[in-house]
Image (tube, rainbow, N blue to C red):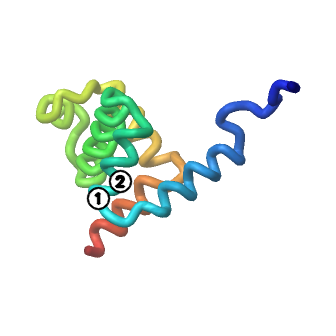
Amino acid sequence: MKKSTKKLGSTDDLKQLHKALLLLRTPDEARKFLRDLCTITEIRAMSERWIAAQMIAKGVPYREIAKKTGISTSTITRVGHWLKDGEGGYELVLKRISKK
């Protein structure tokens, strides 16, 4: 049997993940899917990034975010960078949340 030469994380693989995420309808479904898909450490890391993004968007200083949350300043700085110069994903969701 011939081994697959397809790389893990290829564009097609990522598209399949994106499509799967779009099928989730409730926060509980998202929680279940993420728990099955990711390790607890990965989920906590994503949660921290999301908390940091929300606080940065509200203008909270990085050091204050770190002090209040325990999130490392390096993580907060990375989130700040992606919030400013990323793909716009943080901004998109932040805008949608603010409309609710």
Q: Label 1: few (<14), some or many (≥20) within 10 Å?
A: few
Q: Position of residue 73 (x, y in %)?
A: 29, 26
Q: Which residue is mark 2?
A: 30
Q: Position of residue 79 (x, y in %)?
A: 39, 39
- Label 1: which secondary element: helix
Using the rendered view, name the quadrant where residue 72 is placed. Answer: top left
Q: Is residue 94 above or below residue 59?
A: below
User: Residues under labels 1 and 2: Cα distance?
Assistant: 5 Å
Q: Residue at x 26, y 74 (%)?
A: 100
Q: Which residue is mark 1?
A: 27
Q: Amino acid at mark 2?
A: Ala
**Nearest to the observer: residue 2 or residue 100:** 2
Q: Quick check: marks 1 and 2 in contact, CB under 8 Å?
A: yes
Q: Position of residue 70 (x, y in %)?
A: 18, 27
Q: Is residue 36 left or right of residue 27?
A: right
Q: Residue at x 42, y 47 (%)?
A: 83
Q: Amino acid at mark 1?
A: Pro
Q: Residue at x 32, y 45 (%)?
A: 50
Q: Label 2: few (<14), some or many (≥20) within 10 Å?
A: some
Residue at the farthest bottom position: 99
Q: Is residue 78 above or below residue 60?
A: above
Q: Position of residue 74 (x, y in %)?
A: 35, 25
**Nearest to the observer: residue 74 or residue 34:** 34
